[in-house]
Amino acid sequence: RAEMADQPLGSDSEAFFVDPTIGKKRDWAQSGLSKQVIDVIYWKDPRISGAILAAGLIFFYVTTWGGYSYLTLFSIITMMHLLVSILHGVVSTYQGSSPPSQKPFQLDVEASKKNTALVVEAINNFLKWYFDILSGKNLVLSLQIICLLCVTWTIGTWMDGSTLLLLAFLGGMSIPVAYQNNQSLVDAKLRLAKDKMDEMVEKINNRIPKAETTEGAKKGT
């Protein structure tokens, strides 16, 4: 209990939950996201981003309301791609021209190793953060996580998995560019909300009974 009393609210385990970079410019090049993904979510090329958004909406429509399962849709798309490619090669051969040779897609080995290392590092950081919570050293942060899980549990009872995936997809295609265009306003609101939360957490922390430290116990004796 003495360790609980000495544990500060702004500990390293809380850094995963509270974003300390509000108002600062994010360096997405160090976040593990590729430049292509960053260009898509920030709509650097509206045609490509719009095509991906339309393809995603069509995918969710045919799988959710069209009655197609993921396996059925994958089989249909692959079969159509094979039929069109083979037909194109047969027609080209029949017309006396050799079918165009296509280079197969290849994965970048070095990039794959780097991304794998980033994923492993992220998993290790998450496990360290989670086990810090399990230790019970920061009860306030633990209560915050429990409240957040109650909220997500309630949302999960309202929506199915497909709807949540659709909302996550739409959020990924809209929230980053919306934040970029309104960063100053959003940061001001987030800073105000964080100050209110810190004030409330401090009040709760002051109400929690704290055990005396070793020095305090020696002075009392």
Image (cartoon, rainbow, N blue to C red):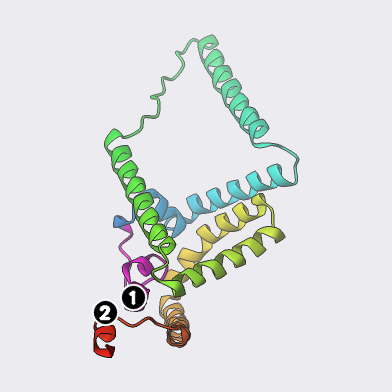
User: At 55% across and 10% down in the image, what residue appears?
Assistant: 94
- Residue 33 visible to the viewer: no
**Which image quarter holds the N terminus?**
bottom left
Q: Which x, y percent locates residue 203?
A: 46, 88
Is residue 61 shown above or below 14?
Answer: above
Q: How far apart are marks 1 and 2 (CA)?
A: 8 Å
* Residue interval drawn in magenta: 1-28
User: At 60% across and 63% down in the image, what residue appears?
Assistant: 152
Q: Nearer the viewer, residue 14 or 71?
A: 14
Query: In which quadrant of the rendered view does residue 153 lie?
Result: bottom right
Is residue 35 shown above or below 102?
Answer: below
Q: Which x, y percent locates residue 178?
A: 49, 69
Q: Which x, y percent locates residue 73?
A: 65, 34
Is residue 212 shown above or below 80?
Answer: below
* Residue ID for mark 1: 2
* Residue ID for mark 2: 214
At mark 1, the secondary structure is helix
